[in-house]
Image (spheres, helix red, strand yellow):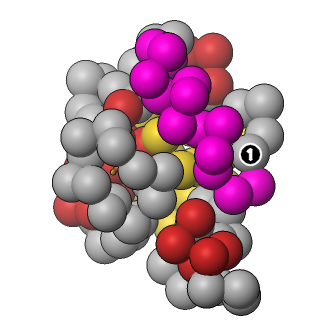
Amino acid sequence: MVTVTVLPHHEICPEGATVELNEGDNLLEGLHEHGVKIEHACDMSKACTTCHVVIRQGFDSLEEMDDIEADLLDRAWGLEPNSRLSCQCIVADENLTIHIPKYTLNHAKENH
Ligand code: FES
């Protein structure tokens, strides 16, 4: 089991969350199953950036992103060096700590 610590996000999980996932689990799906409802506007088809998260711990344990993910992330709100699309992350053998950016691109367009 891998422990995923989700830092508090004002809407999605105000108190933060700690969930246990298995190696090989999809990060976005695993978090959803535990009630952490990260947005996923394109239904995980790598066509939006609403599932953007920043991996604060355990980033190097994840498989490297491909070019499509990298291109999409370039458009994400609050991009950081350790940003990933959570729908493309497969949990490996290290615990993760993730930060959900305050806004998604959808929100940013609405001038929040
Ligand atoms: Fe759209 Fe992840 S849900 S890219």
Residue holding disc 1: 79
Residue at image location 47% in from the left, 28% down from the top:
69
Q: Position of residue 20 (x, y in %)?
A: 36, 47
Q: Position of residue 72 (x, y in %)?
A: 52, 37
What residue span does the magenta drawing correspond to? 65-78
Q: Is residue 38 above or below residue 43?
A: below
Name the one closer to the observer, 87 or 6: 87
Q: Quadrant of the N terminus?
A: top left
In magenta stretch: residue 73: yes
Residue 13 visible from this viewpoint: no
Direction from residue 33 to residue 75 in the image, left or right = right
Q: Position of residue 4 (x, y in %)?
A: 49, 46
In magenta stretch: residue 47: no
Residue at image location 34% in from the left, 43% down from the top:
47
The quarter of the displayed image where residue 37 is located: bottom left
Kind of residue at disc 1: Leu
Q: Quadrant of the C terminus?
A: bottom right
